[in-house]
Image: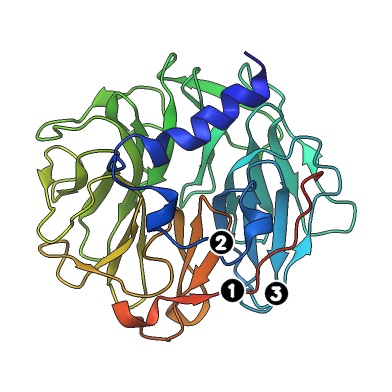
Amino acid sequence: MSRRIAVALLVLSFLLAHLSPRATSEEHPKSSAPFLEKTPIQAISVTPNGHIYAGTFGGGVFMSIDQGETWTDRNAGLTDRDVFALVANTRGTIFAGTFGGGVYRNDGNISGWVQSNTGLDCTEIVSLEIAPDGSLYAGTSSHGVYCSLDNGETWVATGLNGCYVATITANSNNDILAGTKDGIFLSTNHGKNWRAVNNGLTCLDVWEITGHPSRNLFAATNGGGVYRSQDNGVTWAQMNNGLTNKSAGSLAVCLHEQLFVGTTSGVFCSTNNAATWAKVQGSLTDDAIRCLRMGGNGSVIAGTLKGNIYRSSSVAPIPENLGEVFAPVALSDGQ
């Protein structure tokens, strides 16, 4: 099996794992941007100045400076265009994690991306995170977590070797939580030591972890829906009341503390710390959501496996407002 086919199967695994066998192409409308169907949106990041970056499978990185109304190619220097992770620091430096080319850094200048892999033994990067103290973490497909203390110049392995680390998040104490296909692991010393924190987690296939202003933690899992922890990950409780699709792959918290979860059949919203969920109506309800991020003015941005990007249209998002599609990025099949 070629690397390209293997990566494609990995991208589609989330979409296919728990879809109903009755879900056929006749039952769902075609994508509003059919030329994007071969370029799933894998990652979204928003810089401090409000610029939106979108990482795609096969198409590289695109940027919008007008809240998604228009997009431009940002691939200069990016030799691997399977972009699985994006993160921006407070200075506006963007880091891209690629599935094969490792980590690339873009300082916002016209020279584009520079590869930053010194110390990386695995260049299949699937997640990135910047802790409040500026430490940069990279999750890999098979070699666990790496840490950089010098803005990505050099990397050091920090453990969890053998794990597929789908998500990394850091809290205000610089504690690091890694979500893997084998559950959640916690480090309180910059990755020097890890311990499993899976008490109450009945589904171990974790795709994203996020914090909330309530100081709760939430985990999105592929098959178990959403879990909440009120004790920094020591224990977890399943929170799926109203969540009719348990294939959850992404989470976002807006400025008004509403919690959004992306599933293989659209987005759900909770206004009460995940006690109950309501499905967001609109044109994205039949699309598999791969990533959610908070955008400018309190909006929420969604990237999908069909290659669409959506944005809530209100400063104070409510479920009915999350259905406005962005002007799509025009990619050719050859990119």
| Tag nearer the camera, 2 or 3 | 2
Label 1 sits on a secondary structure element that is loop
**Label located before the other in sequence (1 or 3):** 3
What x and y, as percent, mark residue 141? 51, 24
What colouring style does the render use? rainbow
Q: Which residue is mark 3?
A: 65
Can residue 318 be seen at all in this image of the molecule? no
Amino acid type, callout 2: Asn
Q: Which residue is mark 2?
A: 308
Label 2 sits on a secondary structure element that is loop
**Label located before the other in sequence (2 or 3):** 3
- Is 67 left, or right, of 199 in this rendering? right
Q: Quadrant of residue 100?
A: top right
- The furthest residue to the bottom: 315
Q: Decide: is 116 above or below 68.
A: above
Residue at screen point 63% across, 50% down = 55
Residue at screen point 47% across, 47% down = 131
* Quadrant of the frame with the N terminus: top right
Q: Decide: is 133 above or below 45.
A: above
Residue at screen point 26% across, 46% down = 219
Can residue 58 be seen at all in this image of the molecule? yes
Given contact means CB atoms under 8 Å apart, are the residues at marks 1 and 2 in contact? yes
Residue nearer the viewer, 166 or 58: 58
Q: Which residue is mark 1?
A: 326
Q: Quadrant of residue 185?
A: top left
**Label located before the other in sequence (1 or 2):** 2
- The furthest residue to the front: 26
